[in-house]
Amino acid sequence: MHPPAQIFEKIVSKPRLDSYKGYWKVDADKAIGLYIWNGEICAEVSKLLCYFEISLRNSIHRELSLNTTRQVSSSAHWWDTLSPSLKPTTRQRVADVRSAVPHMVLSPDEIVSRLSFGFWPNILSWLAKQRTGLMPKILPAHPLSVPGATPNWWQAPARQRALDEIFELKEVRNRIAHHEPLWKFSDVFDTSPQQPTPPSLVCPASNDEATTLQRFARLLQVYDQAVSSLSPDLHAYIRASSWRARLDFLLSPRGLERYKNGLHVVEPAAITPEELGGQFATLVQQNRPVRLLDVNGGGIFIPA
């Protein structure tokens, strides 16, 4: 099982664990399992976001470099060329990167690698309004980028809705970085209506197990759309990856139950591969990993 509740509370703090007990309506042991479940999800979602971040920043950097050098270079200091029109905070981010290593003259690629994820959605938002024609090149497979599409990037409401989803992913990354519970979703609003029309509710906050799993499903839909917009090939690779399959399991009712009930913890006793074959159906039904051991070594069988 997990560490005893009293010990675990000292590790993560009682208020933090109490938030799990209150939301999920569970006792301390189940709350610990859900805390570990949240950590596993954060680890897998972080992998997804890393691919998205790298792909997004490289696409923006490439297209802005080509645009500001008249197609001469795919890696240029476009932030210097565009400096007069960029926001002060954007210019400061680049200046901070340079000042952190005053003894070096950083190449464009080196600067790009040192800028945080938060920099890129903000640049994308600026681009969408100031250099709209680059959006189909940066997100070539996005529905708004299809030639002749209606709506498209030149229509403000559709553009804002697309950007809102990118910023949702940025917010998820921030929550993971600050060790916040990823399962606690807030309201999502459509901010595309023009003032004085107020934003409309797209998706309400989660408030129980069912709505939490629904919101996770929506989050993955938003992610899939964003990555596919950048590169359908990358999206296909991610969808076929073992770690995406692991995340899909974690976000299933069966995956959640495994952690909530402490069944993710492997018992010390081991069985042989032959015994695994005979007990396979039972072990799958029990939804618990088991330790394997034979003359060649050991391992763990994890039922899906």
Image (spheres, rainbow, N blue to C red):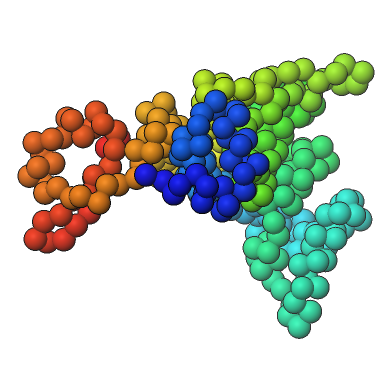
Quadrant the C terminus occupies: top left
Most foreground residue, 191 or 9 = 9
Quadrant the N terminus occupies: top left
Query: Residue 71's x, y, as percent?
Result: 69, 56
- Residue positioned 52% across, 47% down in the render: 6
Q: Is residue 113 left or right of residue 257?
A: right
Q: Is residue 55 left or right of residue 151?
A: left
In the image, is residue 148 above or below residue 44? above
Query: Residue 120's x, y, as percent?
Result: 71, 49
Query: Residue 260's x, y, as percent?
Result: 43, 34
Res. 147 visible in picture: no
- Residue positioned 20% across, 50% down in the render: 269
Most foreground residue, 5 or 282 = 5
Res. 30 visible in picture: yes
Q: Is residue 4 left or right of residue 89?
A: left
Query: Residue 118's x, y, as percent?
Result: 72, 50
Q: Quadrant of residue 104?
A: bottom right
In the image, is residue 94 above or below residue 288? below
- Outermost residue, bottom direction? 103
Most foreground residue, 279 or 79 = 279
- Residue positioned 64% across, 63% down in the render: 113
- Residue positioned 83% across, 41% down in the render: 130
Most foreground residue, 11 or 288 = 11
Total labels drawn: 0
